Structure formats: structure tokens, C-alpha cells
Image (spheres, grey):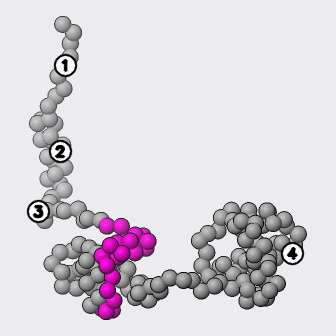
Amino acid sequence: MTLLPWTAPVSEQVRMLALLRLADGWTREEVAQFIGVHPRTLGRWRSRLHREGEAGLSDRPRSGRPPKLTVTQAEEVLGWIEDRSPRDFGFVTQRWTAPRLAAVIESQFGVQLHKRYLNDWLRRHGITPQIPQRRPRERDPRLIEAWVRHQWPRIKKKPATCTRP
């Protein structure tokens, strides 16, 4: 059973659960399989617990660049895509594109994001690029249905009958 990926608070709880299972008499292999980690990882967690106490089980700070958008800003950006039109921000058409979104983010928050990074960021948040289907304003479903029912069978070619010579 794999529980990955874990958030920081969940990671600490999983480490504590694993060490409690070991204390209850489970084998390293059983606990490792249950948690979804390598048995050597359990040994490292146990030695950190003995060396540093419960503080040794807390999540370590991650390296890497911090995100440019805060959590609330990211939620607001995702809300724009779902609830608002690009026309609300001064664009001519209804289609959200990465360059447009980058321009709005920069004007609203003063944060510059590259359009390629923004596409990847959107994909990680479950938003994929979609082009809305074009529909003429004069579209009348009743007329279309009548045409398909009455005119199309008359126009459609009938299959040629194949007979043996």
C-alpha cells in the first residue's frame, strides 16, 4: 500500500505510525510494505528518533526556489480561469492563453511568470488548454434536426448494389 506523495504534516504522522508499528512487534519488512517505503528508511527514522527525539521525525526544510505565487494568489488565479472571462481583464476574445494569464498575473500581483512555466503550472493544477467550440449565433437545433431527418436521406448516396456478372 503506497501513501505517497505526502504533505509535511502527514509525513510526520506516517513516520510516527511506522515507528509505533515497529514497537508493537511488526517486522521491518511488514511495516515498510504497509507504509510504502524501503526498510532502510525505517532504520534511518528510528535512529533519528533516538538521536533527536520526536523533533527528529519532523519534516526537514526543502531546498529549491519558493513559489512566486502565494497559496491565496494561486487560488485566485485558478478562480479567474473557472469563473471569469478574459474580456473582464480587457482582452478581445473569450479564450484564456498562457501569455494572457501571465499578463494578468503581472498586472494584478506584480509577479512575472514565463508562459511555458505557466502552462506546466496549470497542468499540475488540473487545467488543460481547451478551445471552445465555435457556434454560429443563428444556429437553430429544430431546423437542423428537420434537415437531417428529411433532406439528408434524400441527398445521401445509396450504396451501389453489387451483383455477380
The mark that comes first in sequence, 4 or 1, is: 4
Q: Amino acid at mark 2?
A: Val
Question: At 32% across and 86% down in the image, what residue appears?
Answer: 112
- Which quadrant of the figure contains the C terminus? top left
Q: Which mark is residue 161?
A: 1
Question: At 11% across and 36% down in the image, what residue appears?
Answer: 155
Q: CB of mark 4 within 8 Å of CB of mark 1?
A: no
Q: CB of mark 3 within 8 Å of CB of mark 1?
A: no
The mark that comes first in sequence, 2 or 1, is: 2
Report, in whole angstroms, how far the alpha carbon at label 3 lies from the one at label 2.
17 Å
- Which quadrant of the figure contains the N terminus? bottom right
Q: Position of residue 55 (x, y in %)?
A: 73, 89
Q: Amino acid at mark 4?
A: Ala
Q: How many marks?
A: 4
The mark that comes first in sequence, 2 or 4, is: 4
What segment is highlighted magenta in the picture? 108-129
The mark that comes first in sequence, 3 or 1, is: 3
Report, in whole angstroms, how far the alpha carbon at label 3 lies from the one at label 1.
40 Å
Q: Amino acid at mark 3?
A: Glu
Q: Amino acid at mark 1?
A: Thr
Q: Is residue 93 above or below residue 69?
A: above
Residue for badge 3:
138
Using a 10 Å C-alpha cutoff, classify the residue at mark 3 as few (fewer than 14 neighbours), some (14 to 19) or many (20 or more). Answer: few
Report, in whole angstroms, how far the alpha carbon at label 2 lies from the one at label 1.
24 Å
Residue for badge 4:
23
Residue for badge 2:
148
Instruction: Specify whether residue 129 is in view.
Output: yes
Q: CB of mark 2 within 8 Å of CB of mark 1?
A: no
